[in-house]
Image (cartoon, grey):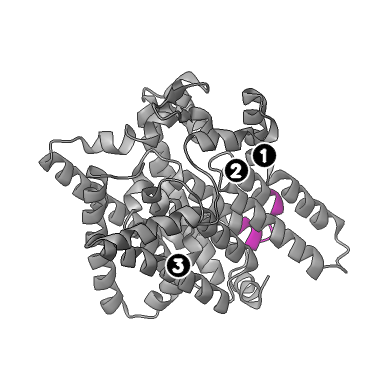
Amino acid sequence: MTDLETRGAARLGAPGPSGALRRAVPALLGYAAVRALGLLALALWSAARDKSAYTLLTARWDSLWYTRVAELGYGYEVRLPNGDVHSNLAFFPLLPWLERLGAAVTPLSYADAGFVVSLLASLAAAWGIFAVAEHVHDRRAGVCAVLLWAVLPVGVVQSMAYSESLFTALAAWSLYAVLTGRWVTAGTLAALAGLTRPVGLAVTAAVWVAAIAAFARDREDRDGRDRARRVLGMLLAPLGAAGYVLWVGHRTGKGPLGYLDVQAGWRNGFDGGAAFARFVAAKFTSFPAALAGVGLIVGVALLVWLYVVCVRQRQPLPLLVYAGLVTVLALCASSYFGSKPRLLLPAFPLLFPLAVGLARLRTARSAPVVCGVAVAAAVYGAFWLNGSGPP
C-alpha cells in the first residue's frame, strides 16, 4: 500500500452506512442531475428522429442478448454468412440473473428490469467511486470524481441495460473494501464482478496484490483471524469468473479454454493492441479520416498520461493494478473498436488526478466547467446513441 492510503484511513476511520451515505449525498445528487440531463437530451434527440429513446436504452445491441439469456437461458447463437458464430455464452450471467429476478418479483419485463438494475447500479457505482476517491484524497475530490465519471462522453451507457454500471459498482466497492481492510467483503464483491464481465480479472488481481502486499508488510503480525480473513478474501475473489469460464468450457466440451473459442466467434481476443494499431494507422490513408486518427492517438496518450500521474500521486497499489489492467484489456483487445470507450468506463481511478485538480478550483470556477461539459456530453451521448452507438 502507500502512505497516502494510510493517511486516508487514519483521517476517515470507518464511518457507518448512514454517515457514509450522508457524506455522499452531494455527489449522488450531482450524478443524478447529470444523468437526468443526458436522458432528457436523448429523449429530445430521439423524438426529433422519430425513434424511441427507451428502446435505444433497453432493446438494442448487447441489451437484447442479455434479455434473451434472462428469458431463455444459455444456448442461443447466430451463425453469420462469413462463418462467425455469435453465441450468448459470451455474456456473463449476473445481469441476466438480476433481470430474471426483477421480472419474477415485479410486473416488469426483462428489458425493464435490466434498465432498473442499471439505474440503481449506476447510483451504487457513483457512491462507490466517491467512497474510494474520498478515502484516497478528500470529500471534495470524491464529489468531483463522480461528476467527471458522469460527464464522460459515453456516459449514457451508464443508463443503458448494459453491464458496465453493475460491474463498476461491484468493482468500486470491492476496491473500497480492500482499502479499508474488509477482505471477505472485497473477495465476495470481486467474485460478483467476475460474474458480470470478463474484466473482473482486474478486480481479482487488485484484491490479490493488496493482500500479498499486506502479508509482506505485516510479517510480524500475530493476528491469525485477520490473516484468515485475508486468505478467505483471496480465495473468494476469482470464483465468479473462474466458475463461469469453466462452466462454459464444460458446456462447449472444449475444456478450460472453451470460453476463448466463444469469444473468437465474436472476433474478440487479446492481441496486444496490434489490431487497434492497424485500425488507427488506416485512418491516415485519407482525409478527413486522418483527423480521427490524430484524435485516437491523443486519446491513448491522455490515458497513458493520466495513469502516470496516478502513479506520481501515489495512488494505492490496488487502484493502480485495477485501472492499469482495465485499460490494457480495453485497448489491447481485438474487439470492435467503437466499443473501446465504453470498455474504459470502469477505469474510474484514472479520473482522480483530474478530480483533484478540479477540486482545487473555487466553486464559482469549477461549476461552469462541469455544467458546460455535462451539456456537451449529453448532446454527444444523444447523437452517439442515435447513430452507431455501442455495439
Provide the residue designation for mark 3: 303
The disc placed on residue 194 is 2
The amino acid type, in three-letter code, at marker 3 is: Leu
Cα gap from disc 1 to disc 2, whole angstroms: 8 Å
What amino acid type should be assigned to the residue bearing mark 2?
Gly
Front-lying residue, 165 or 11: 165
Q: Nearer the viewer, residue 286 or 67?
A: 286
Q: CA distance from mark 2 to mark 3?
A: 24 Å
- Taking 63 as reference, is 193 left or right? right
How would you rate the neighbour count of disc 1 (Cα within 10 Å): few for under 14, some for 14-19, many for 20 or more? Answer: some
Disc 3/disc 1 C-alpha distance (Å): 29 Å
Earlier in the chain: of badge 2 and badge 3, it is 2
Q: Name the dominant secondary structure of the magenta segment.
A: helix
Q: Give neighbour class at mark 3: few <14, some 14-19, many 20+ (Cα, 10 Å).
A: some
- Region of the chain picked out in magenta, as a range: 176-184
Residue type at mark 1 is Ala
The residue pinned by badge 1 equals: 242
Q: Is 234 included in the stretch rendered in magenta?
A: no
Question: How far from the left and from the top, in percent, is residue 136?
Answer: 55, 70
Of mark 1 and mark 2, the one earlier in the sequence is 2
**Is residue 210 shown left or right of residue 367?**
right
Evaluate if marks 1 and 2 touch, with contact meaning CB atoms under 8 Å apart.
yes
Image quadrant in which the C terminus is located: top left
